[in-house]
Image: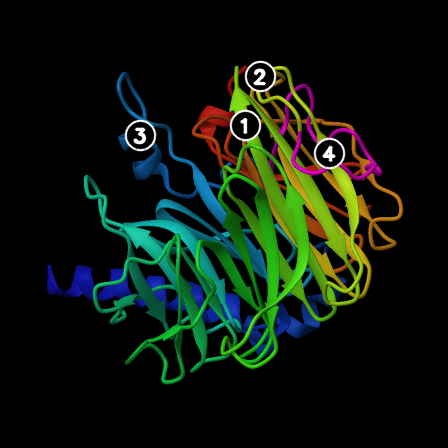
Amino acid sequence: MIIHEWMKRYTAAAAAVLLALPISWAAPAREASAASQAPAPCGSGDHGLLQSLQKQHTGQGQDPLHFSDIQFLTDSTGRAAGTGFMIGTSDAGCHWQEIYKGQWQFTQMDFINNVNGWALATMPSQQTTYLIKTTDGGSHWKGVYTGKNHFERIQMIDSQTGYGYTGIAAYRTDNGGNSWVKVPTPANTRYATFNNTKTGYVLTIVPGSGYRVMQTRDGGHSWATKLTVKTPSTSGGEIYGKDNQVWAVLYGDSGMSQVSYSLYGSTDQGSHWKRVIAQDTAGGGPAPGSWTPVAKEGPAQPGGHPGNMQLVGKETAFLAGGSPAGGMVSVGVTYNGGKTWKNMKPTVNGYDARISFVDGKIGWLVVTSSTKSSIYSTQDGGATWSRKFAFKEALQP
């Protein structure tokens, strides 16, 4: 039994090490002479992984095994995590390895390099969310002190500095999570994000009026209003920032599996804005704001709701979307800071999705709904997708 347990730990650790190394480094020197041989064919379906875990999630009353997040560090190396597992690839999804299998139910992950990562996760049958971190690529995880705070999101700047966000507050650590300091934010803050320790943005609610997007340049000590949007209904939203880009997803009402929302974008740190998407719906009513939008609906129709965003370079932004009514997911994109917007034709089955783009063309999408959970890659900015991993349930008609 001791030898068996040791071998299990050794195998998990070896998978993380292989993921952290280029494929050519992991091959023995004697195999270099075999370069003329045909490469091993790419795997398909579930690649033979997580067989016992898939069986546990099969049957009446069981939620199928599914993904919750995806992150690619390069065009070939990345991870996907979900309900009690994490898998990874170092050859653009041709082959996948099991990195972790255990009790942690991942909700978000943030790797700063191919070895050091952080994650939010729950335990089975528990509602509490824990902050955990790894120093071996994801094979082993340990808890991180957060005091009485239960973070809903994390954002790591480097191995020591990062942010943890609750629904109404932001906290920063400068020592790898050993201690946390509350960042001063304006009243009625509902979302926050920081580009670095100085520059950050918050979304605040103005009761009876609408939303404000505010910016700090001194780590939260002072804040300036950058955008004001009037709307009778304030259901919250998200902010995404990178370098000079800042984007805000603002929600109106929802109903009949539909949500009304607006997407505002800026390429100069909030000095000038465009109302890029304004999606009115029958169930949710009018979208927040009144400016003429570039597009009247977001990705994945009918009645699509937004997923996460990915910002690339100076003017490129992607938005994921899912349509419960249509049973499809897709992305929308701008390459010019919101002057134009293109929603890609939905071709992937699912209800919810998250995306990870490494440049303006190469990206990854994971279906996060409890059914049809699969991983896809694109080489053309989301116009077409190629399936790289799928659980057995997702392959059923």
Looking at the rendered structure, the kind of residue marked 4 is Ala
Which one is earlier in the sequence, the residue at label 3 or at label 4?
Answer: 3
- Give the crowd class for mark 4: few <14, some 14-19, many >=20 residues within 10 Å: many
The residue beneath circle 3 is 57
| Numbered range of the magenta stretch | 287-306
Looking at the rendered structure, the kind of residue marked 2 is Gly
* Inter-mark Cα distance, 1 to 3: 34 Å
Query: Of discs 3 and 4, which sits in the foreground?
Result: 4
State if disc 1 and disc 2 touch (CB < 8 Å). yes
Name the residue at 70% across, 29% down: 279
Looking at the rendered structure, the kind of residue marked 3 is His
* Inter-mark Cα distance, 4 to 2: 15 Å
The kind of secondary structure element at disc 3 is loop
Whether residue 300 appears in magenta in the rendering, the answer is yes
The residue beneath circle 4 is 278
Q: With 301 as the anchor, is 192 left or right in this view?
A: left
The majority secondary structure of the magenta stretch comes to: loop
The residue beneath circle 1 is 253
The residue beneath circle 2 is 283
Q: Position of residue 147 (x, y in %)?
A: 22, 69
- Give the crowd class for mark 2: few <14, some 14-19, many >=20 residues within 10 Å: some
- Quarter of the figure that contains the N terminus: bottom left
Which one is earlier in the sequence, the residue at label 1 or at label 3?
Answer: 3
Name the residue at 58% across, 42% down: 210
Name the residue at 45% across, 41% down: 67
Relative height, residue 102 to residue 63 (above, below):
below
State if disc 3 and disc 2 touch (CB < 8 Å). no
